[in-house]
Image (tube, rainbow, N blue to C red):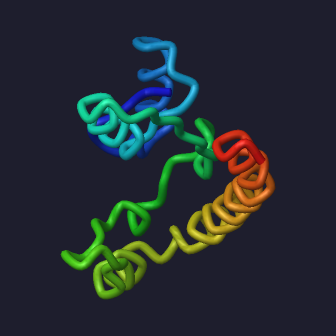
Amino acid sequence: MLGAGAVLATRSDKMRARARFGALAADLESDIVARAAAGAGVPFAALRAIADPVERDLPPAALVPLAADGRPDLAGVFASVLGRPRQIAALFGLRQELRRALRALERAAPLLHSLTVGG
């Protein structure tokens, strides 16, 4: 798992990360939390599921930054889609992959919970 500083949006970006670091996946958040936990002397584990495989470039609308309050910038997403409507199919594909990843996490959550609280 590569703690990336930016989204790996294209197949080329993902392949470079694999070649350079041996990364099978990249993640923006877990590395930050892991460092904070280590600094505080708190144990840390991350359970992640991949929603955008190496074969798929992310559509531009998926790269629109979140608004300041952490919610999706719907105006930015809509503007991106209006500017490049051919990305709609890719957005629906990403949505399906995200749902599959979330279901995998839901199935794994009870096991992780039992391991952490002695279940």
Q: Give how far across and how far down residue 62 sits, in percent.
A: 43, 64
**With 108 as the anchor, is 41 left or right in this view?**
left
The tally of labels here is 0
Q: Eyeballing the image, is 96 above or below 19?
A: below
Q: Is residue 68 left or right of residue 65?
A: left
Position above or below: 84 against 18: below
In this rendered view, identify the residue nearer to me: 68 or 34. 34
Residue closest to the eye, 11 or 30:
30
The x, y position of residue 77, in whole percent, is: 37, 78
Q: Position of residue 54 (x, y in %)?
A: 59, 36
Image coordinates for residue 68, horizontal then vertical, percent: 19, 75
Q: Report the front residue among 83 and 44.
A: 44
- Image point (71%, 54%), residue name: 109
Q: Image check: 45 left or right of 62?
A: right
- On screen, residue 10 versus residue 80, left or right, reads right
Q: Is residue 58 above or below residue 82?
A: above
Q: Place residue 33 in its image quadrant.
A: top left
At a point 32% along the width and 67% down the height, the residue shown is 64
Residue for point 34% across, 79% down:
71
Q: Residue furthest left?
A: 68
Task: Look at 62% across and 70% down and name the residue there.
Answer: 89
